[in-house]
Image (cartoon, rainbow, N blue to C red):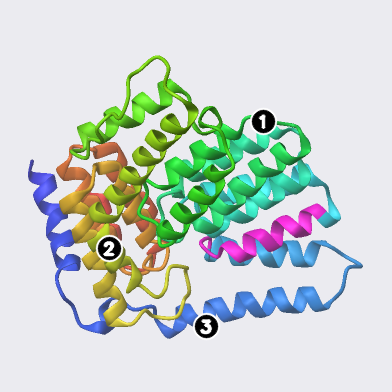
């Protein structure tokens, strides 16, 4: 369509190499952040006699810089102190609506849930929301550790007797491209050493894992099908399946993990990124587009747009990726976000208007 060709001219312009000054945050933007920060510090130093100045200062900063997850936590803590847990929860819900692909944002929200809620089901639902969005992040071990600790405490307190729930979390982790993948395999081996086979997985879960490995080309030969199979043989079979899952992740994600390890900045800051850091993010996106399913590529773009949100070429590339897959509604939503974030860049606004 003609309008697609027109807006893509803008997209191609921003996807192509440009002079460094074309995309880096300007000194004006940096001064804006510093001014917001100074207002927060001034309100904080004024003391607790009046809660409103700090609340307003934090809101002003987050309106301008909504990806600063630490200030969302600070605002939630402020509401918890001066209002109540419901007000703090509302802040966290607002925060994950904006920073939904931030491991840190979800981690502090889960900390709040564990500390504030008596309903274990509600806490578990929160963890599940978190790991669904950011559980495959390279540095998601901080979130998964919290989830494991929560479930282990339920076992220790007698609230839960399902050791298999902890084992199931470990097995989910072993399928992910995490920096701490090897550590989790060692921890699962230690955990399983004290457990009976039925406490690791039931026969349905075992069959599901076996079929998944077969589908992925890493079939594990069944060692026994005898009715009188002893517990030791079944446990050995389960551990062989778990090890196969771990080794498959290591081989599948070896190149991706190497690319991830080179990235230095994953959080937002108004300070410009080094050109080498921008190249590393581009290399990761290229790998994801070549090897991953659409859902994983979308997650990679969302993660990238936390530290790189002030660089229009990443937004345009994301829109192009979505439109090429006929995800027009999703592309339009991304364009709208780009226009809000880069509202001072006229070319971005024009491209959005044409789109």
Write the residue at 39% across / 14% down.
227
- As displayed, is residue 67 above or below residue 215? below
The quarter of the displayed image where residue 182 is located? bottom left
Q: Which residue is mark 1?
A: 121
Q: Which residue is mark 3?
A: 31
In terms of depth relative to the viewer, which is nearer, 224 or 23?
224
Q: Which residue is mark 2?
A: 314
Number of the front mark, 1 or 2: 1
Side of 56 relative to 5 (left or right): right
Mark 1 neighbour density, 10 Å: few (under 14) some (14–19) many (20 or more): few
Please give the range of residues in magenta: 66-80
Question: Is residue 347 visible to us here?
Answer: no
The x, y position of residue 214, in whole percent, is 22, 32
- As displayed, is residue 138 above or below residue 112? below
Is mark 3 in CB contact (under 8 Å) with mark 1?
no
| On-image quarter of the N terminus | top left
The CA distance from mark 1 to mark 2 is 38 Å
């Amino acid at each position: 369509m003609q309008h697609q060709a027109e807006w893509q001219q803008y997209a191609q312009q921003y996807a192509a190499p440009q002079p460094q000054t074309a995309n880096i945050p300007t000194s004006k933007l940096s001064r804006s952040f510093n001014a917001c920060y100074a207002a927060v510090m001034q309100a904080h130093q004024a003391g607790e006699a009046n809660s409103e100045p700090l609340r307003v200062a934090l809101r002003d900063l987050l309106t301008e810089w909504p990806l600063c997850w630490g200030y969302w936590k600070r605002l939630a803590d402020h509401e918890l102190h001066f209002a109540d847990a419901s007000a703090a929860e509302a802040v966290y819900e607002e925060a994950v609506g904006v920073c939904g692909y931030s491991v840190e944002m979800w981690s502090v929200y889960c900390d709040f849930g564990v500390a504030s809620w008596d309903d274990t089901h509600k806490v578990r639902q929160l963890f599940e929301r978190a790991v669904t969005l950011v559980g495959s992040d390279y540095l998601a071990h901080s979130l998964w550790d919290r989830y494991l600790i929560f479930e282990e405490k339920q076992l220790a307190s007698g609230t839960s007797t399902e050791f298999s729930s902890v084992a199931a979390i470990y097995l989910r982790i072993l399928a992910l491209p995490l920096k701490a993948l090897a550590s989790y395999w060692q921890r699962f081996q230690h955990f399983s050493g004290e457990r009976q086979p039925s406490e690791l997985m039931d026969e349905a879960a075992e069959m599901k894992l076996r079929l998944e490995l077969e589908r992925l080309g890493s079939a594990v030969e069944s060692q026994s099908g005898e009715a009188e199979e002893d517990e030791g043989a079944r446990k050995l079979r389960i551990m062989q399946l778990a090890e196969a899952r771990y080794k498959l992740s290591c081989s599948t994600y070896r190149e991706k993990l190497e690319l991830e390890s080179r990235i230095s900045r994953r959080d937002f800051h108004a300070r410009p990124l080094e050109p080498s850091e921008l190249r590393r993010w581009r290399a990761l996106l290229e790998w994801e587009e070549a090897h991953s399913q659409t859902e994983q590529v979308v997650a990679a773009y969302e993660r990238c747009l936390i530290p790189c949100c002030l660089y229009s070429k990443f937004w345009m590339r994301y829109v192009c990726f979505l439109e090429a897959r006929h995800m027009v509604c999703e592309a339009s939503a991304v364009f709208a976000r780009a226009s809000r974030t880069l509202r001072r860049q006229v070319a971005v606004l024009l491209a959005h208007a044409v789109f």
